[in-house]
Amino acid sequence: MTINRHLEEFHGLPVFTFPDADDPAPTAASLPAPDSVAWRVAVEAYESEEEWEDAFARFLAAVDTEKVRALVVGAWSDVYDTAPDAVITALLAARDRLPALRALFLADIVMEECEISWIIQGDVSPLLNAFPELEEFGVRGGSQLVFPAIRHERLRKLTVETGGMPVEAVRGIAASDLPALAELDLWLGTSNYGGDADVADLEPFFAGTRLPGLTRLALRNSEIQDAICTALASAPVVARLTHLDVSMGVLTDDGATALLSGQPLTHLQVLDLHHNYLGEGVRTRLLETLEPAGVTVLADRGDADSDEEEDGTVWRFVAVGE
């Protein structure tokens, strides 16, 4: 699986891409109401004739930004080689012009523009510190991603999509105080692309003490999915979840069996395990155990592929790596 479509919806709003510099100059009549869409600002990923910050300046001039509720940062120029430092600087400079901003997504970039593990990131914490009213924050790309421990009073949803999340970023998120957070979605990725966290680094998420409002937890797209499920089998946080997502990774019968053999899961609304390496026996057991209790179980194998060498070695893959 690859990411080949830009966000179409964000923070409950349809995404609208602000016109390119080559398009006719936008007017209030030609644009949607400022608070009716999530505004996507982007430039060409390669050899763009306009820098992202210049496109953003045009956006600031054309739109009543005091009413903007959601903003999506698309590609900046030369994303393979350039971190979003200038993008972040421009956003920080405009914070007083975005008093209603409640949702921000950094790097809505698809594979034709830059593969997820080649998107260069940096320290994203200044954005969270600058926008204390944010309720939703998302970022895509793990290369050079920095996420130190922070405190944010209002954030309700945090999404970090990577093909490999650096362990220090995982630890920073785990050490953060996010009292309002209800949804956490982490794509941990593979060691081939810098995903070097171990299950021990996820212990604060399992305990859930820093995330007292958490009801939806996704720890997915990981090559250590079996170990994650084994830990979740006795994790205190599970008892208060409505949605548990362990999809997109290398989940085998061992992990699913451990999960089923642990604490009850019948209180869940959704258990998502799509893209997995489960045998039909375990898959059937999951469905027969949980669906009668009203749990929606997503256990389709999907596009989970594996390779077997002549010596019997089997290679399995996360859904989104490179």
Image: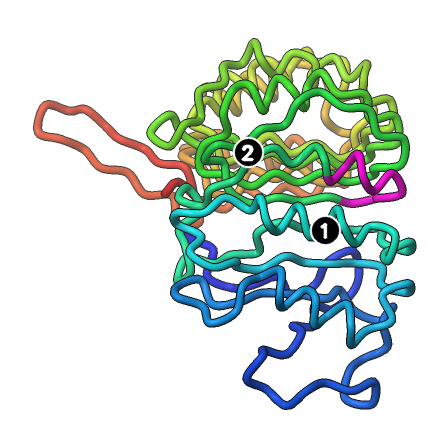
Quarter of the rendering occupied by the C terminus: top left
Which image quadrant is residue 242 in? top right
Residue 193 in the image: state x and y as whole percent.
37, 32
Residue stretch in magenta:
127-136
Q: Is residue 14 visible?
A: yes
* 244 relative to 256, above or below: below
Labels 1, 2: front one: 1
* 250 relative to 52, above or below: above
Would residue 177 be counted in the magenta stretch?
A: no
The residue sitting at 75% across, 64% down in the picture is 38
Specify how the rendered protein is coloured: rainbow
Which residue is at the front of the view, 224 or 44? 44
Q: Dots 1 and 2: beta carbons under 8 Å?
A: no
Which residue is at the front of the view, 182 or 145? 145
The residue sitting at 83% across, 38% down in the picture is 156
- The 10 Å Cα crowd at callout 2, few under 14, some 14 to 19, many 20 or more, is many
Q: Secondary structure at mark 1?
A: helix
Report whether 182 appears left or right of 201. right
Q: Which mark is residue 248?
A: none
- The 10 Å Cα crowd at callout 1, few under 14, some 14 to 19, many 20 or more, is many
The kind of residue on which mark 1 rests is Leu
Q: Which residue is mark 2?
A: 220
Q: Which residue is mark 1?
A: 91
First in sequence, mark 1 or 2: give its number: 1
Q: Secondary structure at mark 2?
A: strand
* 156 relative to 81, above or below: above
Which residue is at the front of the view, 25 or 236? 25
The residue sitting at 38% across, 43% down in the picture is 304
State how far apart marks 1 and 2 are (Cα). Answer: 29 Å
